[in-house]
Image (cartoon, helix red, strand yellow):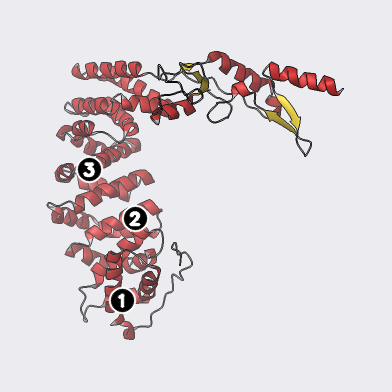
Amino acid sequence: MMISSWRRRRAARREGKLQQQRNDNGEIELTVPRDFRCPISLDLMKDPVTLSTGITYDRENIEKWIEAGNFTCPLTNQVLRSLEPIPNHIIRKKIQDWCVENRSYGIERIPTPRVPVTSMEVSDILSKINVACMKQNGKGCLDLVLKIKSLAKESERNKRCVVSNGAGCALSEAFQAFSRASFDENVAVLEEILSALTIMFPLDVEAKGFLGSASAMRCLIWFLSSGDLSRRRNAVLGLRELVSTDERKINELSDMEGAIEALFKLIKDPICPTSTKASLLVIYKIITSSSTKEKRVKKLVNLGIVSLLLETLVDSERGICEKALGVLDGICNSEEGRQMACNNALSMPVLVKKILRVSNLTTDFSVSILWKLCKEKTEDDASVILEALQVGAFLKLLLLLQVGCVEETKDKASELLKILNLHRNKMECVDPMDNFKDLKRPF
């Protein structure tokens, strides 16, 4: 009986089939045949590919190995004659058959992987897009953009291939070319190009040059001001990409008609957290750039940015909270901004509550804004200071100094404590809304 059992197991191993063994609990354990496992991860291969050395690996693992700068076979250490792995259809079919045979043990059949796109295929599509742009063939370009977008979204590997072959630059140039003509006539192709571009971010300098042209930026603002939600979202992501490193684009954007109003509207009527954060970041860049920022801040204050930011801060996620406080801090550099903040009933409760909550950055911004609002108040105009005391600012700032913070925030907190201390005799310092139970910093 024992000999028969041993022979059956040996035959199963020879045939590459499943080994079944019982563990200490009497449960059957499944052993994946060695030839079906990737030599790198030792996991069942989902997309087996063979290198020039004849060794088969799972595509995802071997591509990571090659992208890390390794040009040798991991198993044999031989130098690879080609960096293009070849799909091993025979092994893949055997693995699929093995999965089907053992589905009763919870093994799911691996899907047949799609053949990844090649650099030659990507280059060919991009060349055709360039030709379609020169001929102003919107329909032809639209079909090609949809194809390249579909390839990029198919897998992370395809996306890397598409991006590395210059798709971002080609699509940005196409966006510029069609934006020079009528927006209404080319709206379909422009919208699809922009949607594909968001997959290619971050863009290189040359691509940003095309997307940052006057006609392209006007088109982005037009999309931002009108159209469906996805179009507006993609437009603000495009603007965020442009202003992230180039101050000249910030100045050009802020001088364009309707830009600031469209960004404000996107915060007021949010589409999604991603677009809200992008809008806040673009506005922050606009109000903190070196030239003519006072004019921009005044426009935003007149639109009602202070009350909008405070309402947003009442209940928002970390990323939005940090960026909204950053914008409010920039707004409070102006006299108009400080006055609007002082007159808003939400200012002190919200700012004090954000100290030592959410993140270090929100604490730094909150203390900075409080310092700007309180430092110039006189004895006859101390309502803001008294309100800060009433909502527990004194206790929060004391605790902040004990917990620790960056030097600049520490200096502002110390100065704020001196200012608040002068008025403590006028009011009992209570903290009705925050008992420190949600502190994010360790003691």
Q: Residue at x 47, y 64 (%)?
A: 438
* Residue pointed to by mark 1: 417
Q: Which mark is residue 316?
A: none
* Residue pointed to by mark 2: 322
Please state if 92 lies on the left or on the right of 201 as rendered.
Answer: right
Please state if 303 lies on the left or on the right of 346 as rendered.
Answer: left
Residue 344 shows up from this direction = no
Residue 342 found in image quarter: bottom left
* Mark 1 to mark 2 CA distance (whole Å): 24 Å
Q: Is residue 259 above or below residue 388?
A: above
In primary-sequence order, the first of circles 3 and 2 is: 3
Q: Secondary structure at mark 2?
A: helix
Q: Residue at x 26, y 36 (%)?
A: 223
* Mark 3 to mark 2 CA distance (whole Å): 20 Å
Q: Is residue 306 above or below residue 276?
A: below
Q: Secondary structure at mark 3?
A: loop
Q: Are marks 3 and 2 in contact (CB under 8 Å)?
A: no
Mark 1 is surrounded, within 10 Å at the Cα level, by few (under 14), some (14 to 19) or many (20 or more) other residues, namely: some
Outermost right residue: 1
Residue type, label 1: Leu
* Mark 3 to mark 1 CA distance (whole Å): 37 Å
Mark 3 is surrounded, within 10 Å at the Cα level, by few (under 14), some (14 to 19) or many (20 or more) other residues, namely: few
In primary-sequence order, the first of circles 1 and 2 is: 2
Q: Nearest to the eye among marks 3 and 2: give it.
A: 3
In primary-sequence order, the first of circles 3 and 1 is: 3
Q: Are marks 3 and 1 in contact (CB under 8 Å)?
A: no
Residue type, label 2: Glu
User: Looking at the image, which is closer to me, 122 or 300?
Assistant: 122
User: Looking at the image, which is closer to me, 421 or 69?
Assistant: 69
Residue 18 found in image quarter: top right
* Residue pointed to by mark 3: 245
Return the x and y of residue 237 as percentages of the image width and height.
30, 39
